[in-house]
Amino acid sequence: SQQGEEDPQALSIQEGENATMNCSYKTSINNLQWYRQNSGRGLVHLILIRSNEREKHSGRLRVTLDTSKKSSSLLITASRAADTASYFCATGPYNNNDMRFGAGTRLTVKP
Amino acid sequence: NAGVTQTPKFRVLKTGQSMTLLCAQDMNHEYMYWYRQDPGMGLRLIHYSVGEGTTAKGEVPDGYNVSRLKKQNFLLGLESAAPSQTSVYFCATRDSAGDTQYFGPGTRLTVL
């Protein structure tokens, strides 16, 4: 079953605005990762945050993790049309090191 | 380096036909995964392998078989395709020392 659930399912913003996506999960994790998927392509890893970290930055990306609430957020600042994609959170590892992916947030950035 | 490649990119099958999807990687990663992606469902793990000669079931293994005879290749087989197996299939790899998964471009399969 899916572990992470992203919210919202879809988000539409103007170029230059910030985009925030949330991920909630159900059981204890070792790490949480965010991936991006452009239409018709495979997923690309964006950023990883470990369970003992609260915030992490990478370029225009900022990820937070609240293990007490079992939730994470991904903030994309100063969005660009090229940021248009689906964003997935993945939590784990479970069993023999597999990760569980949510259903994703579809982000549209209008020029 | 090609990274992770998948063959074929598209395929249309009739119910009951069989086929094999090939995933190849040149990153020398130990772990390999097969996922299916359906609208509104995210990615679901079908089977995975933690090394050459080993395979294990994931979340949705029924109707699929896999083999990892060589470290660089992970094959996903459908013995008797069903319409419910219409999906986009992704292969991914991971180094045993890391947490990041590297994905192939996907195979879009339609079963009529």
Image: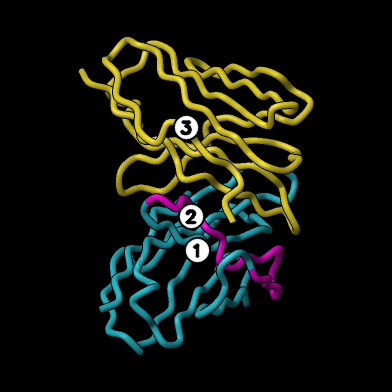
Amino acid under disc 3:
Asp
Q: Colour of chain A?
A: yellow
- Residue B24 is marked as 1
Residue B36 lies in the magenta-colored region: no
The subunit carrying tag 1 is B
Instruction: Give residue A110's position: percent from left, percent from top.
Output: 22, 21
Q: Which marked residue is nearer to the observer: mark 1 or mark 3?
A: 3
Q: Colour of chain B?
A: cyan
Q: In this orientation, which residue lies closer to the viewer: B59 or B25? A: B59
Above-or-below relation of B92 to A21: below
Q: Which residues are magenta?
A: B40-57
Asked if the residues shown at circle 1 and circle 2 are in contact, with their CB atoms under 8 angstroms apart, the answer is: yes
Left or right of B78 in this view: B61: right
Instruction: Give residue A97's position: percent from left, percent from top.
Output: 72, 53
Above-or-below relation of A38 to B33: above
Asked if the residues shown at circle 2 and circle 3 are in contact, with their CB atoms under 8 angstroms apart, the answer is: no
Amino acid under disc 2:
Val
Above-or-below relation of B47 to B14: above
Residue at 71% x, 19% y is A54
Asked which quadrant contains residue B89, the reply is bottom left
Q: In this orientation, which residue lies closer to the viewer: A68 or A109? A: A68
Amino acid under disc 1:
Ala
- Residue B4 is marked as 2
